[in-house]
Image (cartoon, helix red, strand yellow):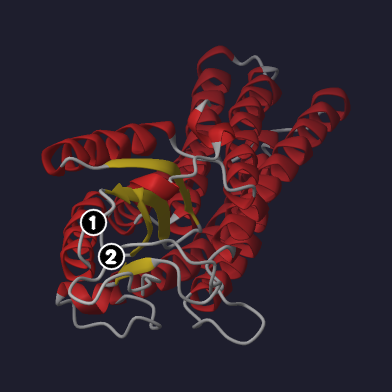
Amino acid sequence: MDSITYTGADEAILHKVAHPAANSHALHVSASEQHVHVHPHEVPADQSRVMSLSLWVAVVLLVVKVTAAVLTGSSAIYSDAAESVTHVLAVAFAAWALRFSHKPSDETHHFGHDKVSFLSSGFEGAMISAAALLIVYEAGRQAFVGGQIESMGLGMLLTAAAAVVNLFLGSALVRVGKKRDSALIRANGHHVLADVWTSAGVLIALVLVQATGWKWWDPICAVLAAGKLLWTGGKLMRESFGGLMDEADLQIEKELRDCLDAESAERGLSYHNLRHRHSGRTHWVEFHLVFPDRTGLGEAHEIATIIEGKVAALLGPEVRVISHLEPRSAEEVEHHWELR
């Protein structure tokens, strides 16, 4: 709640008081308050379902790709199978992280556990990058050692089937991740779609080898697929680092400032010290609202609640909005936030 003092007998006047436990007004909007029948600390059914499906599909497709690699002896298919090994490890870690991220706050984790989502997406990025390096090594070895590619028709069929399954699964994961604003689910979706690129490279390699008889197409396409994987893995690790470091989303900041500008202008107020971050599952927003000195407590509380609700509506079902109320005569701006 806002901290106030009474400076008159008839009216409560806003006045900033240094009290660490009681100098801000907060609004928490969670899935339970949006009339979604999910306990706030349980994994939403769509996320749990799609992650379980991702894990089981990853295991099945690993078996399929290893079988295709053994039957054909293709370095491109071996590279695809190698990527699938890292994919199974990454999905298993992501499935654990998804459950862990929904644990409630406790005595030592006051802001919850959802930042593990960024750790998971970074791990997925690292696994993708490791697979890419393994692919380059295997392609080089095959190119110089040589080897006969056999059963190309069966290898192409198995690889194409795996690619189609991953295309639909990856698209579903990205869609759910965007809907739930989950970095963890989105990262897993991009990992699955990266697997599609690897499979596409395998198919192109086998088609070219079969059409031209030139076996160098096999390692060349494997290396090209590895390049795509390195780009995807690096991007995921970069995003993970940004999330762990509370990097602000500039588009969200613009939307927040547009909202606060409009709401403040309409009510003759001002604001400053806007800060925001995303912790993997929850948006956190805080700002200071500046009121005329003789604004009553009840009125200020009501206005702050309305503005917080407007801000929360911009950011989806999981958001915490904290506003600190100040009288104009005691306004104190932290200029390093306002001059960015």
Residue 229 figure quarter: top right
- Residue 304 lies, in percent from the top left, at 24, 59
> Which mark, by number, is residue 13?
2
Quadrant where the N terminus sits is: bottom left
Q: Residue furthest left?
A: 266
**Crowding at mark 2 (Cα within 10 Å: few <14, some 14-19, many 20+):** many
Task: Please tell me whether mark 2 sits on a helix, a strand or a loop.
Answer: loop
| Residue that numbered label 1 is attached to | 294
Q: Is residue 83 above or below residue 202?
A: below
Looking at the image, residue 266 sits to the left or right of residue 290; the answer is left
CB-based contact (under 8 Å), mark 2 and mark 1: yes
Q: Is residue 110 above or below residue 17?
A: below
Amino acid tagged 1 = Arg
Amino acid tagged 2 = Ile
- Residue 289 lies, in percent from the top left, at 33, 50
- Residue 87 lies, in percent from the top left, at 60, 55
Asked if residue 66 shows in the view, the reply is no
Q: Residue at x 47, y 32 (%)?
A: 200
Looking at the image, residue 200 sits to the left or right of residue 253; the answer is right
Looking at the picture, tell me which residue is in the foreground, 135 or 309: 309
Asked if residue 236 shows in the view, the reply is yes
- Residue 81 lies, in percent from the top left, at 63, 50
Q: Residue at x 75, y 44 (%)?
A: 130
Looking at the picture, tell me which residue is in the foreground, 6 or 75: 6
Disc 2 to disc 1, how far (Cα)? Answer: 5 Å
Looking at the image, residue 307 sits to the left or right of residue 146; the answer is left
**Crowding at mark 1 (Cα within 10 Å: few <14, some 14-19, many 20+):** some
> Which mark, by number, is residue 251?
none
Residue 67 figure quarter: bottom right
Task: Please tell me whether mark 1 sits on a helix, a strand or a loop.
Answer: loop
